[in-house]
Amino acid sequence: MPEGADVASIEALRDWLAALAVYRDGVGESLAGVQIEIRRGLEWVAEQAALWQRAVRDCEEEVTQRKAELAAKKFPNWDGRMPDTTVEERNLRRAQARLEHAEEQVRKCRSWVARLPKLIEESYTPHGHRLQLFLEGDLARGMAVLDRRIDALERYAGLRTDYSSGPSSLPAPKPEGPS
Amino acid sequence: MRFGANRSQLYDAQKTARARWDAAAETWNDASRRDFEEHVWEPLDAQTSEVLRAIDQLSSLFTQVRQDCEFNP
């Protein structure tokens, strides 16, 4: 024999069902928002890689220019002495350091561009996907069953004036699938 | 790539839903409640917690990415 329904307040169940719908919508929005941020993140890394690549080209031009300036100074003066090239050498070293830094940044960005999708797949995607499926499947079905059960209780309570005054032991409204 | 707002929204929604479930469960104590709890509410709550942890991992990941890649010549 099925266990009777033990519901002290149908209104509380209705409230819960409404709260669950709000929760479902909030979770769905959050999951969609996370997906948007992931896409933005992937685009951002690609943009940074392009910016650093452009910086490499600029730095290469600067190195070429600094080398030319240094070479132009490496001729003896009118008195046969070599001019001081300290400034030009320092400028060249700095330009080369900037170039190396930009090249290293390009390598880092490319490495992240290559690795990020897999890391996201490992850390987040299965969890987000599973919850999304749950919202659309088990939760939707569970809410539908609960809604029908509340309807049945409300119909039954319509026959009893004392129903909502406290806990009662009603027969199960109707047999249904898993709820 | 800023996950804070989405995480907060999810966290707050879970917190509110837990309180509403506790309230509902006080007035509902039969086999259908236990069935709902086992097959709907508890898996939903657990999976939400898993996603919150996964968002935290994502956030750490992208913090590292930002530190490594941000264009600041």
Image (cartoon, coloured by chain):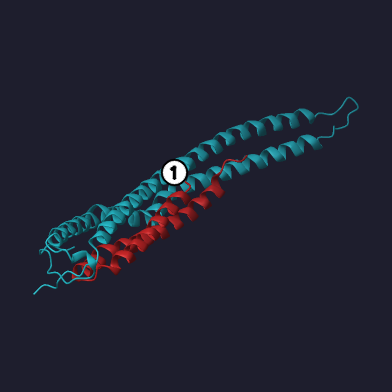
Chain colours: A cyan, B red
Quadrant of the image for the C terminus of chain A? bottom left
In the depicted structure, whether residue A170 falls above or below residue B63: below
The residue where tag 1 is placed is A42
Q: Where is residue A102 shown, x and y percent of the image?
A: 59, 41
Q: Where is residue A11 shown, x and y percent of the image?
A: 25, 59
When asked about the image quadrant of residue A131, the answer is bottom left
**B3 to the left or right of B28:** right
Q: Which residue is at 16% across, 59% downward? A: A154
**A135 to the left or right of A57:** left
In the depicted structure, whether residue B48 falls above or below residue A110: below
Q: Which residue is at 88% across, 29% downward? A: A80
Q: Which residue is situated farthest in the bottom direction here?
A: A1
Nearer to me, A132 or A120:
A132
Nearer to me, A34 or A106:
A34
Q: How many marks?
A: 1
Nearer to me, A50 or B43:
B43
Q: Where is residue A25 shown, x and y percent of the image?
A: 32, 49
Quadrant of the image for the N terminus of chain A? bottom left
Q: Which residue is at 72% across, 37% downward? A: A92
Q: Which residue is at 62% across, 44% downward? A: A101
Amino acid type at circle 1 is Leu
In the depicted structure, whether residue B61 falls above or below residue A37: below
Label 1: few (<14), some or many (≥20) within 10 Å? some
Nearer to me, A28 or A88:
A28
Q: Where is residue A113 shown, x and y percent of the image?
A: 45, 45
Q: Which residue is situated farthest in the left direction here?
A: A1
Q: Which residue is situated farthest in the top direction here?
A: A78
Q: Which residue is situated farthest in the front direction here?
A: A161
